Every structure is written in structure tokens, then in C-alpha cells.
Image (cartoon, rainbow, N blue to C red):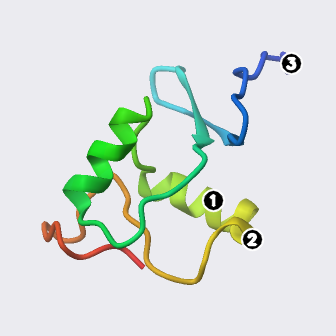
Amino acid sequence: MATKRKLPALKKGEVYVGGTIGPDGRVTHTILLPGEKADVNWKDAMAWAKKEGGDLPTRIEQAMLWAHHRKLFQQRAYWSNETYAGLSDSAWS
């Protein structure tokens, strides 16, 4: 049986990406925040996301963004909340 769940309210410029369900059954909603920080290092990108009340996307969330919202992104590397092989100056691409 499917149940309808209310989606979170979005602020102007935000885009609802989707939700993931963790092993504990908790739903985490992914919302793309407006604006972006280009040409900054990982630490600064993480600080910007936190200041905006969010977090950088996980690798799974990045895949959802690429699959469903590709047109919102330039073809370049974007930071996730995970460093690439432990190198904080290299983005996943």
C-alpha cells in the first residue's frame, strides 16, 4: 500500500530533487538551493552550503541531479559532501 507524504515547502528558487529512504526508514529530502559557488575549494563550498542551511549533495544525490535536472548544470565538475579519494582539492566529475 502506497501512502502520500507531504513534500517539504520550497523557498523561491529551490528545486525539489527527490527523496531517499535510509535503512531506518527515515526519508531524506534533497533540495537544490539557488545560486552556486564556482571556482572555490571544497572547504569553502561546504561552508557556503552550511551557511545556506544545507549541505553539498552526496554522490547518490549528485546522480539524481544529473539524471533528472541535468539542464540546471554546466558540464564541469561539482563538489559533493565527500572528498575524492581523500583529496579536498579534487572534485568528482
| Residue where numbered disc 3 is placed | 1
Q: Residue furthest bottom?
A: 75
Q: What's the CA distance linking mark 2 and mark 3?
A: 34 Å
Q: Nearer the viewer, residue 51 or 64?
A: 51
Residue at the image point whose x is 71% and y is 42% from the top: 13
Can you say whether 31 is above or below 82 in the image? Answer: above
Residue type at mark 2 is Lys
Residue 45 location (% of width, % of height): 32, 54
Label 1 environment density (alpha carbons within 10 Å; few <14, some 14–19, many ≥20): many
Which is more N-terminal, label 1 or label 3?
3
Residue pointed to by mark 2: 71
Question: Which of the 4 quarters of the picture holds residue 42?
Answer: bottom left
The residue lying at 75 percent from left, 71 percent from top is: 71
The x, y position of residue 72, in whole percent, is 70, 65
**Which amino acid type corresponds to the residue marked 1 in the rendered image?**
Leu
Name of the residue lying farthest toward the left: 86
Q: Of callouts 1 and 2, which one flags the residue occurring earlier in the amino acid sequence?
A: 1
Left or right, residue 40 beside residue 11? left
Task: Give the left or right position of residue 14, taking residue 36 as reference.
Answer: right
Name the residue type under label 3.
Met
In the image, which is nearer the foreground, mark 3 or mark 1? 1
* Quadrant containing the N terminus in the rendered view: top right
The vertical placement of 66 against 52, above or below, is below
SS category of the residue bearing label 1: helix
Q: Are marks 2 and 3 in contact (CB under 8 Å)?
A: no
Picture quadrant of residue 74: bottom right
Kindly indicate whether the residue at mark 1 contacts the one at mark 3 (C-beta within 8 angstroms): no
Q: CA distance from mark 1 to mark 2?
A: 9 Å
Residue 65 badge: 1
Task: Give the quarter of the figure containing the C terminus.
Answer: bottom left
* In this rendering, the label closer to the viewer, 2 or 3: 2
Identify the element where label 2 is drawn: helix
